Amino acid sequence: MPIIVNLDVVLAQRKMRLNDLAEDVGITPQNLSILKTGKAKAVRFSTLEAICEVLDCQPGEILEYRPAAAKQELLEQS
C-alpha cells in the first residue's frame, strides 16, 4: 500500500505509549494498533484530528504517500 503510517515514529518522538494515546483519543488500543501497523483500510477525519491534537502534530507527520512502496508490494506479490 502506498500510504505509510508513521504513528509509531511520532509516538516515540513524543515519548508516549499507544495505550495512553488510545485513552486520550477515546478509541480502543486495538483499533489504534490496527492503524499503527498500517492494516487499517480507512481512518475517520475526527479520529485523525483527535490523534493530531493529542500528539501536537500535523496529519502529514502520521501519514505518508510512497508510490515506490506500492510498486514494490506488487512485485513481491507476483
Image (spheres, rainbow, N blue to C red):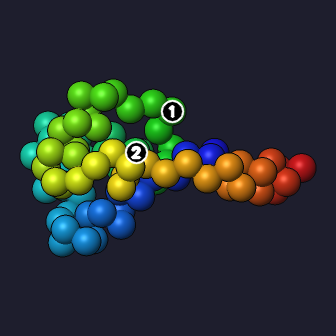
Separation of residues labelled 1 and 2 (CA atoms): 8 Å
Disc 1 and disc 2 in contact, CB within 8 angstroms: no
Q: Amino acid at mark 1?
A: Lys
Residue pictured at 43% horizontal, 48% vertical: 63
- Give the answer, above or below, for where 54 lies relative to 45: below
Residue located 85% across and 54% down the image: 75
Seen from the viewer's position, the closer of residues 27 and 9 is: 9
Q: Mark 2 falls on what kind of element?
A: helix
Would residue 64 be seen by someone viewing this image from the given angle?
Answer: yes
**Is residue 3 rendered to the left or right of residue 20?**
right
x%, y% of residue 22?
19, 47
Residue type marked 2: Leu
Q: Nearer the viewer, residue 48 or 30?
A: 48
Disc assigned to residue 41: 1
Classed neighbour count for the residue bearing mark 2: other residues with Cα under 10 Å, few (<14), some (14–19), many (≥20): some
User: Which SS class for mark 1?
Assistant: loop
Question: Based on the displayed image, in which of its 4 quarters is residue 8 positioned?
Answer: bottom left
**Res 7 quadrant in image:** bottom left
Q: Furthest-right residue in view?
A: 78
- In the picture of the structure, the residue carrying the numbered disc 2 is 35
